[in-house]
Amino acid sequence: MGDSGPPCIAIAHVAGLAPACALPFAHRVIEAHFEQGADLNDPSTYAPMLAAIGLSPRLPDLHDRSLAEAVWEGGRRIGLRRFPTLALLRGGRAQVLPAEYNPARLSALIARALE
């Protein structure tokens, strides 16, 4: 069973080091999990993803509950409730979209949100 703390910590770490790399890194994390079945609770999973964006493979302790809570609190402030969450950012505010895993329905949700 997975824990969303480690990927959240890893993504927040990248955002702090290289903000422009955070979104591409988050995409890599999600693809690694959902497309390749990678274990996001294993710190070694992140090394190739970090290398691909030019960052050191060193991460903070991905299993530090207080660090995970701090990251989640930051997300809650902008409306995020789970990992992964799809949100549209406008003017510094997040519009969280409903969880949807069907590509056609997800595309329709995004189109409506962009109207």
Image (cartoon, helix red, strand yellow):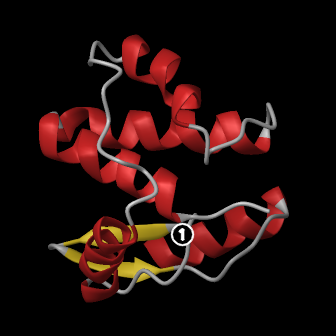
Q: Nearer the viewer, residue 91 or 15?
A: 15
Callout 1 crowding tier (Cα within 10 Å): few <14, some 14–19, many ≥20: some
Q: Residue at x 63, y 83 (%)?
A: 98
Q: Residue at x 80, y 62 (%)?
A: 1
Q: Is residue 44 above or below residue 66?
A: above
Q: Is residue 115 visible?
A: no
Q: Is residue 52 above or below residue 10?
A: above
**Quarter of image, res 54:** top left
Is disc 1 placed on a helix, strand or loop? loop
Residue 66 in the image, given as x and y percentages of width and height: 31, 73
Q: Amino acid at mark 1?
A: Thr
Q: Is residue 5 above or below residue 51?
A: below
Answer with left or right where residue 6 lies relative to residue 73.
right
According to the picture, the residue beneath numbered tag 1 turns out to be: 85
Q: Count up the numbered dots.
A: 1
Residue 4 in the image, given as x and y percentages of width and height: 57, 64
Q: Nearer the viewer, residue 115 or 71?
A: 71
**Quarter of image, res 34:** top right
**Quarter of image, res 92:** bottom left
